[in-house]
Structures are given as structure tokens and as C-alpha cells.
Amino acid sequence: MLVLGFESSCDETGVALYDTHQGLLAHALHSQVTMHAEFGGVVPELASRDHIQRALPLTEAVLKQAKKTLSEIDGIAYTQGPGLAGALLVGTSIAQSLAFALNVPSVGVHHLEGHLLAPLLEENPPQFPFVALLVSGGHSQLMRVDGIGLYQLLGDTLDDAAGEAFDKTAKLLGLGYPGGPALAKLASKGSAQFTLPRPMLTSRDLNFSFSGLKTAVLNLTNNNQPLTDATKADIAWEFQEAVTEILMEKSMAALRETGLDNLVVSGGVGANSRLRERLNAATKRRLCTVSYPRLEFCTDNGAMIAFAGAMRLSAMRLNADQLESNGEQQDYSVSVKPRWDLAELQAP
Ligand code: KG4
Ligand code: ZN
């Protein structure tokens, strides 16, 4: 089954073609980072308008890359939520219009399900069940994953997400948007000169809290004026140490509590090399495995949506003809879910 996937939930337009027999055939991405950088964050209206400009040229690019035509597509997947309403509407409208025109089934994919399943796009994919650490700009969650749509939340952030903490701390240090990669780069030039707290490290649950850490960084910057580049690097180093230690310890606790021995990491913060270093060492010590998506699939992309959609569409064995013969109609309506709890998902 050949599935075309669209991602447009925030500031990246991603389109990809996934084939259930041959795997990922092509993917293309346009990042709006430079456009939003001058405003210090994502401007939703600009994001929506840019998605409109990019979606069809990217679609043509992936079809050309894969040497496929629209008529060969068997199904369409699109990010239906959560995300920015206007941005989601662009991908959803284009996907549903195409699915209607081609008379093929379509499926609205949960953006976080896309992230969660992204490591399965790699060679030697992890097997179910596993513990997932999902660390993105909007989420920091630990989940038990027993299969497609079988997600049990084990722990969540009580305030800021890990990526959000990276972004806000980067802002405090005068780094650009997006802050995560910039802060990680600066941290590589720092060393252990300061001490920051490790919030919730010893709490007996699997929850996180990162907003206190951001306040502690603010105090450090206030107490070390004028901030030299070297001081900023040392603060960045300690901040990264604190966040990655908490993420590593909680992930190990989740493996212990569930009795599982596979950890899967996804989301933008999963690209952080210090986090990978720590998780690699800790899982090795415990004789567990850890899997990550390739770096470009840690952050938003179309491949993860095409993949998650293909898993759902093929499992549902949906096709428009079959539906019609059952007297049902494929739903081509355009509706988005800017807020959508992952726990609402069910197995296809
Ligand atoms: O998954 P993602 O692309 O978008 C969301 O769905 O949120 O994640 C983006 C987040 C941003 O907060 C960004 O600063 C963070 O991931 N990020 C990183 C790194 N690369 C991206 N954080 C720390 N280290 C990195 N190398
Ligand atoms: Zn994302």
C-alpha cells in the first residue's frame, strides 16, 4: 500500500511517500525556521500561509523522487492534531481534497503518534512492547507502547516540556530561535562551574518538572553579570547536564517499573547528543536496548506521518470501494484537532 503523508502542525511542511512493502520511498521538508527567527518564535498566521505555498511543490518533489504518479497512491495520511489550528487546516484540506479526488481512503494522524513511531522507520526497528520517551517542544512523556494505538501514559511533565525548557533557557542566554540546538552547541564549549537543581529526580513517580530549572538559570544569569561568553557556555553545560540526567534517570525508572527492556526515544530533544550518550550508557549497564529515529526524523517531518498513517490504513484494510459496498462513505470532511489527547487513540 502506497501512502502519501502530510505534516503541517507547526513550522515545518513535510511530505513523504511510504510503501508498506518497500518502506520509505521519498520525503521532503521545508523548515520555516529562518522566517520565524526574526520574531523569536513561531507566528501562527505566517506559518499557515507558508504551508500553503510549500505543500504542493513538496508533493511533486516526493512523487518525482520516488518515480511515482498520483494515480498510484493507495491512501493519504495527514497530521490532524495537535498543533496550530491554521497550520493543521492547510495540510488537512490538501490531504482530504486529494484523497477525495483520487477516491482513496485517508486518515488523520496524531502528531505525537507520528513521533512515537518514527524510530520504526529505521533498520532493525524496535519490537513492541517498549517504553517510549517522547521529548519535544510541547511534550515530555514516558509511555508504555504495546502496539499501534496502544499507549499507556506512565509519566508527564507538570509544567514546561523538555524542549520548551531548552528554548526558554536559550532565550535567557540570548541565543536565537529555535533554542535547543543552539543551547546544545554552546554547552559543548562549557564545563562544570555551576550547580543547578534536578527537579523531581527523586520523586517516586515518573513525572517531570522543568520550569523551576528555568528560574534557577535566570537567577544564575542575574548573579553573574556581566555575562561573558564563557559563563554562558558553563550555564548551558550545567543546564544540559540537569535536563539529560533527569530524562535518563526517569527513563531507567520506567524500564524498571514496567519490566520492559526496550527504550525508544523520539521528538526534537531526542536529537540531543548528550542525552543519547547518557541513555546509551545507562541502557547498556542495564542490558537494555535503546532506539532513536535518525536525526532528521527527531524533529517534525512527513515521513513519520506517512508511516503512522500507513500502519493505520493497512490495519484498517480500508478502501473506498469496500466502504461503499458496506453502504458507508469515506469521511473527507476537513476537521482539525488543535488539542488532542494521545490517550484517546485506539488500536486501528
Ligand atoms: O519534535 P519537535 O520538532 O517539535 C514538536 O513537536 O514540539 O521538537 C522541537 C523541540 C524544540 O524545543 C527544540 O529546541 C528541541 O526540540 N531540540 C533540541 C535539539 N534539537 C531540537 N533540544 C535539545 N537539543 C537538541 N539538539
Ligand atoms: Zn513534533
Image (tube, rainbow, N blue to C red):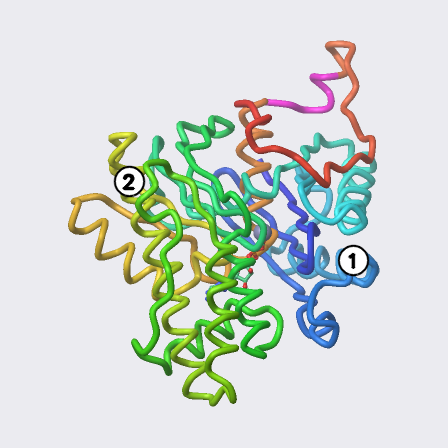
Q: Residue at x 52, y 58 (%)?
A: 163
- The residue identified by callout 2 is 253
| Mark closer to the chain start, 2 or 1 | 1
Discs 2, 1 touching: Cβ within 8 Å:
no
Q: What x and y, as percent, mark residue 175?
A: 57, 78
Give how far across and how far down residue 275 sits, in percent.
Answer: 35, 60
Q: Quadrant of the C terminus?
A: top right
Q: CA distance from mark 2 to mark 1?
A: 37 Å
Label 1 beta carbon within 8 A of ligand 1: no
Task: Examine the image and state in which quarter residue 308 appears.
Answer: top right
Q: Amino acid at mark 1?
A: Pro
Circle 1 SS class: helix
The image shows residue 299 at horizontal and vertical percentages of 54, 58
Residue 127 is marked as none
Q: Is residue 108 magenta?
A: no
Amino acid type, mark 2 = Ala
Left/right placement of residue 83 relative to residue 154 reads: right
The residue that mark 1 highlights is: 44
